[in-house]
Amino acid sequence: DAYEDGLGTFSYTTNYVYTAQYSPTASTSYRAGGLRFRNVQIPRGAKITSATLRVYLYNTTYDDAYFTVYGNGDDDTDATGAAADFSTNQDILQRVKTSAGVSVEHGYCGTGWYQIPENLKDIVQEVVDRETWNSGQPLVLLLLGKEVALLKRFFPYSYNQNSTYGAELDI
């Protein structure tokens, strides 16, 4: 898991996946988050009927979910998932995005486990329909803050903080 601010400062060792909407996007207040799910066991071309994302929020100050979710649109033919690894590819904002994206706009999500109500099935479908997709590869979701005047922050725990509280993708 990782985040990147609008000026390109990147971290993959952080305890939280910082996501914040703000205008202008070229600022340190703007943040984009990335979630990497390892060893996703879905055959190429499988029909995806549902994909839900759960995250653990630790503080009501940072519980405003205002972002767009995309899949990482890069083809990753390496079985180890090297292209999806944030430690070797240190970017979020410059990654190729899926054409499918889902807008999320929820304020005051609270603390503890929070399930994002939007269905991410079209994003996952686009990823597993690629010719280069193989079951067992990693799947990356990009959480890109929206460009607006009012700062909204969403800081769920990172897998790095504690794997017990890392994001969960249920497909």
Image (spheres, rainbow, N blue to C red):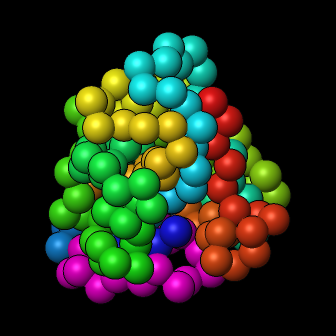
Residue at position x 26%, y 46% from top? 75
Please tell me whether residue 132 is drawn above or below residue 111 in the rendered image. above
Instruction: Please provide the residue range marked out in magenta.
Output: 6-20
Q: Is residue 105 visible?
A: no
Please tell me whether residue 33 is drawn above or below residue 79 in the rendered image. below
Q: Main secondary structure of the magenta part?
A: loop
**Front in this rendered view, residue 20 or 81:** 81
Q: Quadrant of the C terminus?
A: top right
Left or right of 100, for residue 45: right
**Front in this rendered view, residue 69 or 132:** 132
* Residue 112 at x, y percent in the picture: 81, 58
- Let me know if residue 13 is in the magenta part: yes
Left or right of 55, for residue 11: left
* Residue 35 at x, y percent in the picture: 50, 59
Residue at position x 23%, y 58% from top? 95
Q: Is residue 1 visible?
A: yes
* Residue 155 at x, y percent in the picture: 58, 67
- Residue furthest front in the image: 79
Residue at position x 40%, y 72% from top? 86
Please tell me whether residue 21 is drawn above or below residue 119 in the rendered image. below
- Let me know if residue 16 is in the magenta part: yes
**Front in this rendered view, residue 78 or 99:** 78
Q: How many marks?
A: 0
* Residue 151 at x, y percent in the picture: 41, 65
